[in-house]
Amino acid sequence: EAAKREADEKVKIEAEEKARLETANREVEEKAKKEVEEAAKRQAEEKGKKEAEEKARLDEEQATKEAEDKLKQEAEEAAKREADEKVKIEAEEKARLETANREVEEKAKKEVEEAAKRQAEEKGKKEAEEKARLDEEQATKEAEDKLKQEAEEAA
C-alpha cells in the first residue's frame, strides 16, 4: 500500500508538473503571439506613417510644381501681352507717321499744283499781253500802211 501510495503520489506530482509546464508553455506562447502581433501592428503603423509622409512629400512636390508652372505660364502670358502691346503701339505709331506723311505729300502736291496753276495763269497772261501787243502792232502797222497808201493815192 505504501508503494502504491508512493506511486500514486509520484504520478500525481508528475501530472501536476506536466500541467504546470503546459500552462507555462501556453503563457509563453500567448506572450510571444501577443508580442508578434504588437510588433506587426507597430510595423504596419510605421509603414502607414512612412507612406503618409511620402504621399505628403509627393503632394507638396506636385503642388510646388503646379505653382511654378502657373507662375511660368502667367509670366509668359504677361510677356506676350507686353509684346502684343508693343506691336500695337508700333503699329499705331507707324499708322500715325504714314498719315502725317500722306498729309505732307498731299499738302506739297497741292502747293505744286497751285504753283503750276499760277505759273500757267502767269504764262497765259504774258502770252495774252504779248498777243495783244502783237495785235496792236499789227493794227498800227496796217493803219500806217493804209494811211500811207491813201496819201500816195491822194498825191
Image: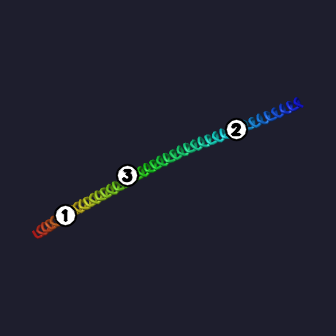
Residue 134 image position (x, y, % from top left): 19, 62
The numbered mark at residue 90 is 3
* Of residues 108 and 74, the one drawn nearer to the viewer in this rendering: 74
Where, by quadrant of the figure, is residue 41 drawn? top right
SS assignment at label 1? helix
Residue 47 image position (x, y, % from top left): 62, 40
- Upstream in the sequence, badge 1 or badge 2? 2
The image's colouring method is: rainbow
Left or right: 20, with 6 as reference point:
left
Q: Label 1 neighbourhood size at 10 Å, few (<14), some (14-19), many (20+)?
A: few
Which amino acid, by three-letter code, is at mark 1?
Glu
Q: Residues at badges 3 and 1 in contact (C-beta under 8 Å)?
A: no
The numbered mark at residue 129 is 1
* Of residues 136 and 112, the one drawn nearer to the viewer in this rendering: 112
Residue 92 image position (x, y, % from top left): 37, 55
Which amino acid, by three-letter code, is at mark 3?
Glu
Q: Label 2 neighbourhood size at 10 Å, few (<14), some (14-19), many (20+)?
A: few
SS assignment at label 3? helix
Mark 3 or mark 1, whichever is nearer to me: 3
Residue 133 image position (x, y, % from top left): 17, 63
Inter-mark Cα distance, 3 to 2? 87 Å
SS assignment at label 2? helix
The numbered mark at residue 31 is 2
Above or below: residue 5 compared with residue 137: above
